[in-house]
Image (spheres, rainbow, N blue to C red):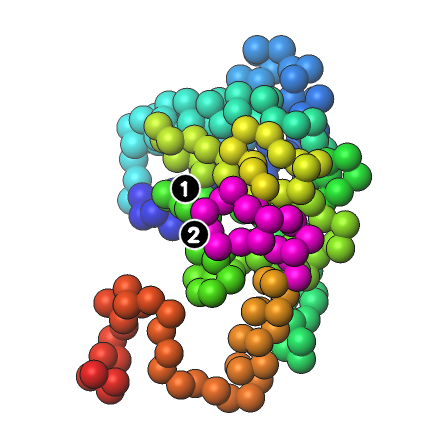
Amino acid sequence: LTPLERGDVVHLAMEHIWKTISSQAELLALSNDDLSNLIHTAIDNAFFWLHGRRGDLGERFFRIERDRLYSVIAGWLSLESQRTPFKVISIEKMIEASLGRLPIRLKTDRIDEIEGKEFYIDYKTGKSTLTGWNPESLSAPQLPIYAVAGNDESCGVGIAQIREGDLQLKGISDDTCISKGIISPGKAKAGLPSTWHETRAIWKEQLENVAEEFISGNASVAPKQKSVCQGCHLQGLCR
């Protein structure tokens, strides 16, 4: 599988799970057999999509991949069971919003409700860090955009790193949502203010500035980091 396909399979499996159950309380109430059946059904759902996309894959591959996925998903749900109590209120939700004058359409992987506040989650199957949320560069703007465009009463954002051997929920929040892996913005070592309210405000300012540049046709070459240029195919134009 390509990294993109692996990510899609995990997304589809998690989508099925959280459409079948909708809260941590329901997860904790499952018997071992019911939990096992839920995971297998979620994998079946993802594999139905994968069979249609990759007819070249044999049954032996699917048996091996099922065992691997089962272990990863079971481990992830064990981690979810240790979080602050939550309800899953939205899966793959489309949001229409604006950044300044720029209209945007978003699809959030998942929105949890924790003590009446929204917490935005994005699934990742690769390694991830919070450094991309630094307002000075904002090289990973996806979750900051969710936070700015979403409910004003949100409490934080998090990356669900569903990766074999390295399962982590990492993110930032106000005091409401803090649990294992979720910390206050000032402790994230990402150049963020100390509070969630201040972080949302500075993200909003930076994102609206970028949106205004886009609307105005500003296309000057101004990479925030040298690494941006390493993968660019237009180096000859701006050497």
Residue 217 showing in the rendered view = yes
**In magenta stretch: residue 190:** yes
Label 1, residues with CA under 10 Å away: few <14, some 14-19, many ≥20: many
Residue 66 showing in the rendered view = no
* Front residue of 136 and 61: 136
Q: Earlier in the sequence, mark 1 or mark 2?
A: 1
Q: Which mark is residue 215?
A: none
Callout 2, which amino acid?
Thr
Q: Which quadrant holds the N terminus?
A: top left
Badge 1 marks a residue whose secondary structure is loop
Residue at 34% in and 47% down: 3
Relative height, residue 62 to residue 203 (above, below): above
Relative height, residue 162 to residue 70 (above, below): below
Residue at 72% in and 48% down: 154
Residue at 62% in and 11% down: 31
The image position of residue 14, as x and y in percent, is 55, 36
The image position of residue 12, as x and y in percent, is 52, 41
Callout 1, which amino acid?
Thr
* In the displayed structure image, the side of residue 237 where residue 75 appears, left or right: right
Q: Which quadrant holds the C terminus?
A: bottom left
Q: Which residue is mark 1?
A: 125
**In magenta stretch: residue 130:** no
* In the displayed structure image, the side of residue 234 where residue 199 appears, left or right: right
The image position of residue 85, as x and y in percent, is 69, 27
Q: Quadrant of residue 222?
A: bottom left
Q: Which residues are magenta?
A: 185-201
Residue at 43% in and 52% down: 131
Q: Which residue is mark 2?
A: 131
